Amino acid sequence: GATLGVMGGGQLGRMFVHAAQQMGYFTAVLDPDTASPAGLVAHYHIQSDYVDEQGLAQLMQRSAAITTEFENVPAAALVTLEAHRPVAPGAQAVAICQDRALEKAHFGRCGVPCAPHAVIETAEQLAAVDAALLPGILKTARLGYDGKGQVTVKTPEDLAAAWTQLGRVPCVLEQRLDLAFEVSVIVARNAQGEVVHFPVQRNLHRDGILAVTTVPAPEVGPELQAQAVGAAESLAASMHYVGVLCVEFFVLRDGRLVANEMAPRPHNSGHYTLDACDVSQFELQVRAMTGLPLVSPRLHSPAVMLNLLGDLWFDDAGRTREPAWAEVLALPGVHLHLYGKLNARAGRKMGHLTVTGSTPAQVQDVAQRCAELLGLAAW
Ligand code: ATP
Ligand code: MG
Ligand code: MG
């Protein structure tokens, strides 16, 4: 029993810990919150701030190899760890993925198309922005997630106001693109450069938060599939990436595939792999970081994944309630995952459910029925 360490104890850390333990590893989780979802199921919970030297030292002592569940780890902390232990993904890759400006530059280096954009770090750069980028979306270069740290802007005046609203931190202005739909692809790469991938999944976002993932999606043909996988593999290879990497893409109305952003970790859009594939994204993270063989995952069932946000825990009058689990669990092929979070809040990811079944149509039917029972919007 070697111990695998993970920086961050949210739901991604929790599902990583489940996979590691299933394969016989002990687990150490570094998170400031003792009631963190992963901390609750880890063998060793290290309560400390992520940047805390002592926390890092303890994680290093405990762990044979270390991974992260979120991209906002200070790259310097990963550099320190890397000097002593295998760290997957490594500091260089995380540094690129945690900063939209570096990330877009990396897309450019790899010849992967992304939205027309400008980096805004100074008032001069703000004033010099090409009006052709408007209407656009101003995004903080760092620390945004679930659509936070983003403002839609139509005019140069909006843009100036938005930059002030975001605290005049380094930002990227992106042209607002005409999306047909969104997809993502998850690849896993090991230190030898071997790479495997999951099928491309279609993602529906609501209010900037992932709501529904569908796989296979009828709109994703073989050509789109090959393009997305090829792009993700080349992005991973050129970062010397080790571990699971997700790349989000836009598919434009004219059919072009455009990269949106990368996540240097297992991803919400890959949660269906737990129930619908013969190896999950979390198991591949364990395999990649420990040098165990990677295998090509096989999707053995069509799947629809629904995110369960904290909103479901409140009725129309704002009183707390427990969602109708017994009713959805009475339907065939429903796999409920709750993350052990104690406080529900609107927009907070509390869990997800995946529907598997024999045909895409049947899975869609059951998933829509689940949405209805839970009070989620249809799609
Ligand atoms: P995540 O939680 O996935 O990390 P995030 O906060 O980093 O999200 P983005 O992925 O940049 O945010 O954007 C969130 C959503 O907003 C996208 O999935 C897409 O629906 C929409 N969006 C973002 N950028 C654009 C764009 N340039 N044109 C059109 N829609 C966009
Ligand atoms: Mg993001
Ligand atoms: Mg995103």
Image (tube, rainbow, N blue to C red):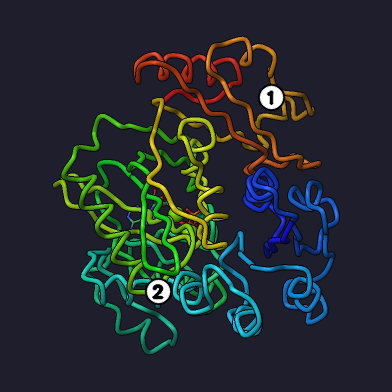
Checking the image for residue 205, the label placed there is none
> Is 2 drawn above or below residue 107 in the view shown?
above
What residue is disc 1 on?
Answer: 316
> Is 74 drawn above or below residue 177 in the view shown?
below
Residue flagged by tag 1: what amino acid is it? Answer: Asp
Residue flagged by tag 2: what amino acid is it? Answer: His
> Is 333 drawn above or below residue 145 in the view shown?
above
Residue 78: x and y in percent read: 61, 78
> Is 23 drawn above or below residue 3 in the view shown?
above
Residue 56: x and y in percent read: 75, 76
Residue 204: x and y in percent read: 41, 38
Task: Using the image as rendered, state which of residue 150 and residue 189 is in the foreground.
Answer: 189
What residue is disc 2 on?
Answer: 240
Task: Using the image as rendered, state which of residue 84 and residue 241 is in the foreground.
Answer: 84
Q: Is residue 10 left or right of residue 363?
A: right
Which quadrant of the view contains residue 359? Answer: top left
Q: CA distance from mark 2 to mark 1?
A: 49 Å
